[in-house]
Image: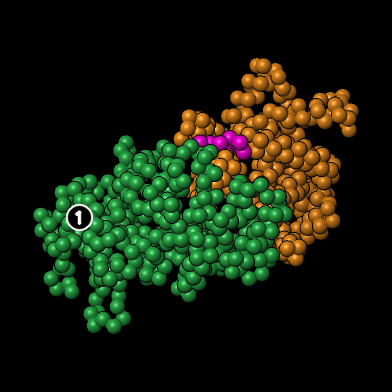
Chain colours: A orange, B green
Amino acid sequence: MWKTVLRRVLFMIPQLFILSILIFALAKLMPGDPFTGLITPDTDPKTIEALREAAGLNDSILVQYGRWITNAFKGDFGVSYTHKIAVSSIIGQRAGNTVFLSLFTIIMTYVIALPVGLLAGRYQNSIFDKIVVIYNYISYAVPTFVLGLVILFLFGYQLQWFPTSGSVDVGVTSGTFAYFMNKLYHLILPGLTGAILGTATTIQYLRNEVIDAKQQDFVKTARSKGVPVSKVYSRHIFRNSMLPITSNIGMELVALISGSIFIETIFAYPGIGQLFIQSIGSRDYSVITALVMLFGVITLIGTLVSDILMSVVDPRIRLD
Amino acid sequence: MENENQLLDINHLHTGFRIKDDFYDAVDDVSISLEKNEILAIVGESGCGKSTLATTIMGLHDPNKTKVAGEVIYQDLNLVDLNEELYNKIRGNDIGMIFQDPLSALNPLMRIQDQIAESLIFHTKLSKEKRYERVLELLEQVGIPNPPRVAKQYPHELSGGMRQRVMIAIALSCKPPIIIADEPTTALDVTIQAQILDLLKELQEENGTGIILITHDLGVVAEMADRVAVMYAGQVVEEAEVGELFNNPKHPYTRSLLNSIPQMDSENDELHVIDGVVPSLVKLPRKGCRFAARIPWIAAEEHEENPVMHEVAPNHFVRCTCYKNFHFEEGGE
């Protein structure tokens, strides 16, 4: 299995190379450049021109790409045009927040979705199941920004139970338990929003898997052995129903890390999603390209993790 | 009980499935019994209710969707009336079941040893070590080479024949006096079929087990069974010792079935076909001879109005009087 993992990792190199060309080309295709916003009627065009020259924007595309990719390979994605500090350090500050938020969201999602999905599937067509199905339809249909705003308004402004922005309060010492709890406190609203949206698919998925597994022949075999129904569920049906979910965790995490743009923007949560949207607004190429590259790497790793997990939980799948 | 050799006594058993708001009997007034050391074959086409009969004996139907009435007497207990808890003591321990397709009947995520040991968990007080000793013993008994290795494998790693041997080991694990085998060889290829049947016969002779063998393969019946019940549209239409049934079939359906077996030395190139189809559960006529529609050349007055079983020879029973003047259709044979 480790051979396969190594082969897959090596295969990522050409994939990332192709991705880098695409990203670079797309960034260059965007209209304007970081200095467009600085032009006012009073600006001397020569100043702008000098800035462009200094930033290397007047070199040929190939030279610019070559410079970017060599530096990127060394972990240096250049300096942010707007923030004037190294891209890697800006992303570094924010990535931690996003990973924290994503993990929190995914844990909340599964804590809610696992029991609900399994029970809804087991007691199909019961009143509980019907309520769950209606809940699924609604939470699946509601867009992120609507749900986010409703939650923000209700729990943030009206009830004032939770903070409405940021990832930590000013003045809390980093590294202490209080700091951790304060961060967690800021996570609850954005995490809840993400979890509510995530539960819809997970519950529906699990419910259908349970309903499907119930009719499998091996369930009849287990029953004919004299295994009580509740044990048939815990020993046979649930395990089989969890397969697709388990293998999906990797991709789910990828989707959260690279897809938290709406949630982070609504809750003004300083993560990479918010950074991404801000950077697009300010045409901060170096940050945009670095982030898209990062999303690419995460996706590739996520798929690999999914495949590994799948082979761990399902004996029929072996990586080789 | 009139006969101490009797293991299972089924009287007037009805199993009705719910379709919309009505219940339709898929098993309609079946009365048969099984003795120790006996292989009772139940034959019939797909949809005649033979598998439903098996699952009814095991009590595996969802009570919300099925209605079971009648008696399945086992050791003075009517299984039909048992609650789940008591039934679970019977299932696996007193009645073992072997299913048709051993791949789908085994849990793909569980090792063979855990699947066999499962019934031991619920029916015995054996320690974990003792359970696994018993698993190896069972695998040995069903003729699996290298039991310690197979015990650790998963179903997909075994061949079809091996999987069915594992299913048999599961059914045997608590040494039940009764085994129900629901088309145990249908999913296997012919050479493996013979091996599995030999194994079943061998185990039955060794342990004195009573086996209810459900099949649509008359070749299997001839080879294995002591007694045969032929089912058509939810009812038993003929019941006899195996030799008697093959040599002296009475009911038009049995005769048609036997006539449908291709003969190697026959000069007739065409296979005999029973015209028409088995009526669906909803459209099934509840009165009169159910086979009448498929032998329309037999006059209506030949059939009984409410067909009952007639003993035409010792221990040979036939439903309806239409057998008396039955002949195959002109030009058919």
Instruction: Label the magenta part by its dominant secondary structure.
Output: helix
**Residue A89, above or below B47:** above
Q: Amino acid at mark 1?
A: Cys
Question: Left or right of A261: which side holds B289?
Answer: left
Q: Residue at x 59, y 42 (%)?
A: A231
The foreground one among A177 and B252 is B252
- Which type of secondary structure does the marked residue at label 1 adopt? loop
Magenta residues (range): A113-124
Residue A281's spot in the image, x, y percent? 69, 38
Residue A228's spot in the image, x, y percent? 56, 42
Quadrant showing the C terminus of chain A:
bottom right
Q: Chain of mark 1?
A: B
Question: Left or right of B151: which side holds B312?
Answer: left
Question: Left or right of B244: which side holds B203?
Answer: right
| Residue A116 part of the magenta-drawn span | yes
Residue A144's spot in the image, x, y percent? 60, 34
Q: Is residue A21 visible?
A: no
Q: Residue at x 10, y 54 (%)?
A: B301
Q: Residue at x 52, y 46 (%)?
A: B90
Which residue in the protein does label 1 denote?
Answer: B320
Q: How many marks?
A: 1
The foreground one among A76 and B187 is B187
Q: Residue at x 71, y 51 (%)?
A: B128
**Residue B165, above or below A175:** below
| Residue B309 part of the magenta-drawn span | no
